[in-house]
Image (cartoon, rainbow, N blue to C red):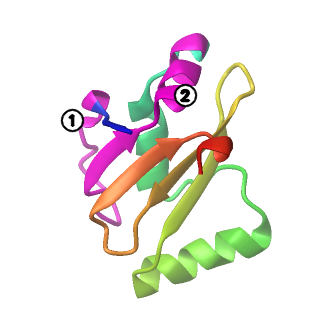
Amino acid sequence: MQPNSNASERPSVRRFALGQTYITPRAEEALMIAGQTALEFLRRHMSCDWGELSDEALGENEFSLREGFRLLSAYRTAKGQKLWIITENDRSATTILLPDDY
């Protein structure tokens, strides 16, 4: 994995820290193919728009947000590629990856 250089900007409102941001090579390629940036998905993640998660997973994220556990978002790029964002429980790191990269 490599650090994500596109994540230096941060929205002024957020409910949790991202820590160091990373993006896997395959996720970076998927974003380039879709003509999108990591920052657009990180902003959604930081604003607690968890994307395409089940009701159970949404509830887990709300619990995890309160209790300090791992956070997961699931999105699709404009080309339909699934993309995950995971923030670690200690908020030290956030990784953008494809599900197959996990």
Q: In the shown orientation, is residue 53 left or right of residue 12?
A: right
Q: Is residue 14 magenta?
A: yes
Location of residue 30 in the rendering, given as x and y in whole percent from the top left corner: 58, 22
Q: Marks 1 and 2: in contact by CB < 8 Å?
A: no
Q: Up-down: is 34 above or below 19? A: above
Query: Which amino acid type is shown beneath numbered disc 1?
Result: Ser
Q: Is residue 57 left or right of residue 5?
A: right
Residue 3 on the magenta span: no
Quadrant in the picture for the N terminus: top left
Question: What segment is highlighted magenta in the picture?
Answer: 5-33
- N-terminal of the pair, mark 2 or mark 1, is 1
Across and down, in percent, residue 9 comes to: 23, 35
- The residue that mark 2 highlights is 26
Residue sitting at x 39%, y 74%: 89
Residue 75 rendering spot, x and y as whole percentages: 65, 42
According to the image, label 1 marks what residue? 8
Secondary structure state at the residue bearing disc 1: loop
Front in this rendered view, residue 102 or 53: 102
Instruction: Name which residue lies at 61% across and 39% down.
Output: 98
